[in-house]
Amino acid sequence: MSSSAVEPGTKLAERFRLEDRVHESGGATLWKAIDEVLARPVAVHTFAPDFPRLNEVVTAARAASRLTDPRLTQVFDATEDDGRSYVVSEWVSGETLTDMITSGPLDPERAAALVAEAAEALAHAHEANLGHLCLTPEHLVWTAGSTVKLLGVGIDAVLSDVTVEDPARADAEGLGRLLYAGLTGHWPGDEQEGGLPAAPMDDGHFCTPRQVTAGVPGYLDTITCRALLPESRRGLEPLTTPEQVAEALASVPRPTPMPTPMPMSVAPPPLSPVAASRSEGLDTAAPQRPSPPLPPQHHHQQRSAGGGMVNKVAMTLVVLLVMVAVGLGAWTLGRSIGNAGTPEAGQTATPTPTAEAATREVKPASATGFDPLGGGDERGELALYAVDGKPSTDWHSESYNSEDFGRLKDGVGLMLTMDQSVPVKQVSVDFGSGSGGSAEVRVGDSQNLKDMTVIGKSAEASGKKTFNAESPQKGRYVLVWFTKMPTYQGKFRGTVIDVKVLATK
């Protein structure tokens, strides 16, 4: 059958009635159709007689039909013959990722949760040697049934004639693009996708999500870079498979709403048919109905009423006796412990100090970038972000061409000022996801470098580091001082996501 002969109203296999032509490209046509046997909408691909990859499409569709993850589009039928070749799959209604970010980026945790679901589903497909290879925001759908669906696994790559040497790596990068789009509302690709604006560039590379959108958590920025932006992940293990992306996002809370339980005495209402949309497939998973109430056993209830009352009284007495016994035991034990700890006449009880009682957190009154060997200030407008307690914000230095600041200075840093001089015992610093570099922490009552005492050093200015003073060092100023810069997007830049100061009481 030629593609021109396939018109609305055509019935395939005496079952699938074609209704609306959704898309047509390269000899393949996507239809919205009705399965007249099961009275449900389905998606049907038909093909022109000269379609060059018909056998490959049908083979891929049959392989996809064996996938069991409910987050993947289910394939119902795939037939290849000289008359009518077609692939039938479920029709999914809901919002695509494109729809969701048209007006701006999603909440970071929601974007990550959607991509995490897609990554887990795609990892399942790769176990069966099926990939996607052409992930776009149109393929990720939040369905009308409040579930995630990933469209086109196994089939769309053949339809688009896309092949790659490393399918797992390609899909990991595709998931990274979806996460980038959800976090920023921009598409990090060679061309704009679905009307989304292109991701901004910096020195020929895509900007990281945190550079594009304020409030993106550092760990999601890092995951995106590990999957998608090799120039931004120096020192970090790349994510090269969907399974690795899924593992990296495993701790993200999922957005699926919980169904509201029905009273057992009320019969559940009949399921309403789901309205179909232009999206391919249909979410067919119906919510579970509560078990029907058991038929009333009036006669048995009447005969056992007296016995039930006696049992209740006996059970109440047993519970009361147990409570009295436990109370007496606890009182006796407490009394003996109290007597053991009571000092004899003439002695004074000395409380044992605890670690928590020994120190207290000191909040800085102010913070500023510190560059005494250069212009005096180093991105001071960002300094308060390092002490706001938010992992999504940070202070960072200027970018340099070498780890030694281009030999222009010996270091730069972040200066914290306390309300008064305090005995500093410990300083914890989160340097973020860079690699390399070196840093130290100094304390003093003067902002002069020579007057400040070094309480700790780290040969790696990345991740979370703790600097402990051998003995409390008194001072009003605490300086996080970079002596070498970590790498950042092909250059060198110091970052402080969070810093906490503990002083002795």
Image (tube, rainbow, N blue to C red):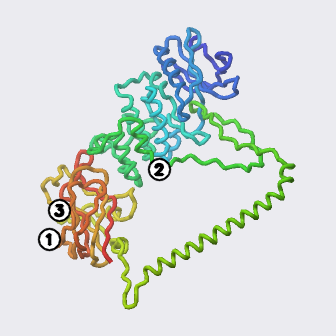
Looking at the rendered structure, the kind of residue marked 3 is Gly
Q: Earlier in the sequence, mark 2 or mark 1?
A: 2
Q: Which residue appears at 18% of the width and 55% of the height?
A: 484
Q: Which label belongs to residue 109?
A: 2
Marks 1/3: CA–CA distance: 16 Å
Marks 2/3: CA–CA distance: 40 Å
Marks 2/1: CA–CA distance: 45 Å
Choose top left, top right, bottom left or bottom right for residue 361: bottom left
Choose top left, top right, bottom left or bottom right for residue 192: top left
Q: Which of marks 2 and 3 is nearer the N terminus?
A: 2
Of 503 and 321, nearer the camera is: 321
Q: Nearer the viewer, mark 1 or mark 3?
A: 1
Q: Where is residue 426 in the image (x, y as percent from the top left)?
A: 28, 68
Q: Name the residue under label 3.
A: 374
Q: Which residue appears at 71% of the width and 49% of the height?
A: 262
Of 30 and 143, nearer the camera is: 143
Q: Where is residue 24 in the image (x, y as percent from the top left)?
A: 53, 22
Looking at the rendered structure, the kind of residue marked 1 is Lys
Label 1 crowd bin: few (<14), some (14–19), many (20+), radius 10 Å: few
Examine the rendered structure and indicate whether residue 344 appears above or below residue 151: below
Residue at the top extreme of this rendering? 82
Is 406 displayed left or right of 284 in the figure?
Answer: left
Looking at the rendered structure, the kind of residue marked 2 is Glu
Badge 2 element: helix
Badge 1 element: helix
Q: Which label belongs to residue 450?
A: 1
Q: Which label belongs to residue 30?
A: none
Badge 3 element: loop
Of 229 and 207, nearer the camera is: 229
Is 263 displayed left or right of 185 in the figure?
Answer: right
Examine the rendered structure and indicate whether residue 504 appears above or below residue 461: below
The image quadrant where one finds the C terminus is bottom left
